[in-house]
């Protein structure tokens, strides 16, 4: 029986390419050397018309790592590392690029193919750091805005907690209504949340905090101008809170009280009008009956007092003075106080009723 013997030939590959100058023109008579992985010369050729101007080719190469170097004395040189795996390789070498870099004092590296990944890595790192810093700045900006909002809230809580809720027990709650139905109100305040029974609410006032207009200062004296000192506010006097001191010698004197609630309304000019009714439930005549309103200007304790007299009955004293703010026992009288816009903003108020008694 005949035996056939044959050798299995290994598959080979080729490296081909073109050599150009900086302007992209193909170059002839350029020496091209093929090196193995250890830098040993394997083959040599030159660009010629055989393959076309500027072209070269190395054939019958096994898979592995190689390097191709091209040089021409008057132009320069170029090199590129190549790995052959399962297909032929085509490359392009540009002469003169490294020579230009050497003239500028830039150290030549092994090849453009190796340097490009390093530059790309550096650019990626720079872009990442920029994004990181941008995110940190956005976070810090958010914290600054939050601190500014909190600072404004504590300086002027009415910017957020604008609802003044007056209860039937005489207390007042400043806050923001976050939920309400037919039975309850849930109110957010500086100290937390409160749930209030709606039946306990007398009324709810919407406080609008206005901004004070800056004082005009002539341009000629702006640099040396200093604003005048703030006047000291007088403390309110609660005369009617101690009727025993006025009527200590009398068994039963005048006693003037508020009937119902004080109504509030605002006109188109933002003037606020407070109105109500006063009654003398005592046993003597009350003269010069008035209502003192003490307005809380801010949360630091500053106050300002306005007074209005009750429209009652006329009475002429022995001295010839006549008043229309007297209330006989059991009589009632109305009062009205107009707070103009230039009074400024306030966060709440309290009131006292005052009167005099004469024989």
Image (cartoon, rainbow, N blue to C red):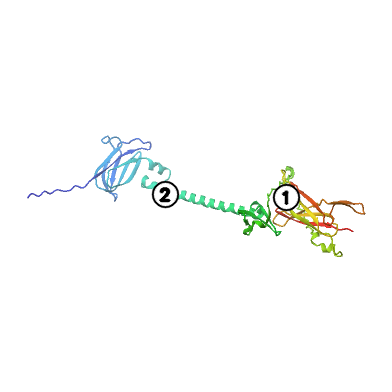
Q: Nearer the viewer, residue 170 or 191?
A: 170
Q: SS of the residue at dot 1?
A: strand
Please tell me in which quadrant of the rendered image residue 191 appears: bottom right
Task: Estimate how packed mark 1 is, as few (under 14), some (14 to 19) or many (20 or more) residues with alpha carbons within 10 Å.
Answer: some
Decide which of tag 2 and tag 1 comes sooner along the chain.
2
Residue situated furthest left in the rendering:
1
Q: For this rendering, which residue is in front, 10 or 306?
A: 306
Q: Secondary structure at mark 2?
A: helix
**Classed neighbour count for the residue bearing mark 2: other residues with Cα under 10 Å, few (<14), some (14–19), many (≥20):** few
Image coordinates for residue 146, horizontal then vertical, percent: 59, 53
Q: Which residue is mark 1?
A: 264
| Residue 299 on image: x %, y % | 69, 56
Q: Would you say residue 333 is visible in this rendering? A: yes
Tell me where residue 205 appears, x and y as whole percent.
68, 52
Residue 143 relative to residue 274: left or right? left
Provide residue 18's location: percent of width, then percent of height.
31, 38
Residue 172's place in the image compared with 223, above or below, is below
Q: CA distance from mark 2 to mark 1?
A: 71 Å
Please identify, in this view, whether the residue under mark 2 or under mark 1 is nearer the observer: 1
Relative horizontal placement of residue 30, taking residue 227 as reference (left or right): left
Instruction: Read off the residue under disc 2.
Output: 121
Q: Which quadrant is the C terminus positioned in? A: bottom right
As drawn, is 244 to the left or to the right of 8? right
Name which residue lies at 44% across and 49% down. 124
Q: Is residue 255 above or below residue 223?
A: below
Residue 175 image-quadrant placement: bottom right
Q: Nearer the viewer, residue 193 or 2?
A: 193
């Amino acid at each position: 029986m005949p035996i056939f013997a044959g050798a299995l030939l290994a598959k080979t590959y080729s490296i081909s390419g073109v050599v150009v100058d900086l302007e992209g023109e193909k170059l002839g008579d350029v020496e091209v050397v093929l090196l193995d992985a250890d830098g040993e010369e394997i083959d040599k050729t030159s660009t010629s018309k055989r393959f076309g101007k500027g072209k070269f080719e190395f054939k019958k190469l096994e898979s592995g790592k190689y390097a191709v170097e091209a040089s021409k004395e008057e132009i320069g040189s170029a090199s590129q590392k190549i790995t052959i795996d399962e297909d032929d390789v085509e490359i392009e070498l540009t002469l003169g690029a490294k020579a230009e870099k050497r003239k500028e004092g830039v150290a030549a590296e092994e090849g453009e193919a190796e340097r490009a990944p390093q530059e790309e890595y550096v650019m990626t790192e720079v872009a990442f750091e920029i994004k990181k810093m941008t995110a940190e700045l956005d976070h810090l900006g958010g914290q600054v805005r939050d601190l500014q909002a909190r600072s404004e809230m504590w300086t002027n809580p009415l910017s957020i907690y604008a609802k003044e809720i007056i209860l039937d027990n005489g207390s007042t709650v400043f806050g923001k209504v976050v939920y309400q139905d037919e039975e309850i109100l849930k109110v957010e305040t500086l100290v937390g949340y409160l749930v209030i029974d709606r039946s306990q609410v007398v009324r709810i006032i919407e406080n609008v905090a206005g901004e004070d207009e800056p004082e005009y200062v002539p341009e000629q004296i702006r640099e040396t101008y200093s604003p005048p000192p703030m006047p000291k506010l007088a403390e309110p006097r609660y005369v009617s809170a101690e009727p025993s001191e006025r009527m200590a010698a009398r068994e039963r004197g005048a006693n003037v009280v508020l009937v119902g609630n004080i109504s509030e309304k605002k006109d188109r000019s933002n003037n606020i009008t407070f109105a109500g009714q006063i009654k003398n439930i005592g046993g003597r005549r009350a003269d010069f009956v008035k209502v003192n309103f003490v307005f809380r200007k801010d949360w630091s304790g500053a106050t300002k007092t306005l007074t209005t007299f009750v429209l009652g009955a006329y009475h002429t004293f022995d001295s010839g003075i006549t008043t229309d703010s007297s209330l006989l026992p059991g009589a009632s009288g109305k009062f009205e106080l107009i707070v103009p816009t230039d009074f400024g903003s306030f966060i709440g108020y309290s009131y006292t009723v005052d009167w005099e008694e004469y024989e």
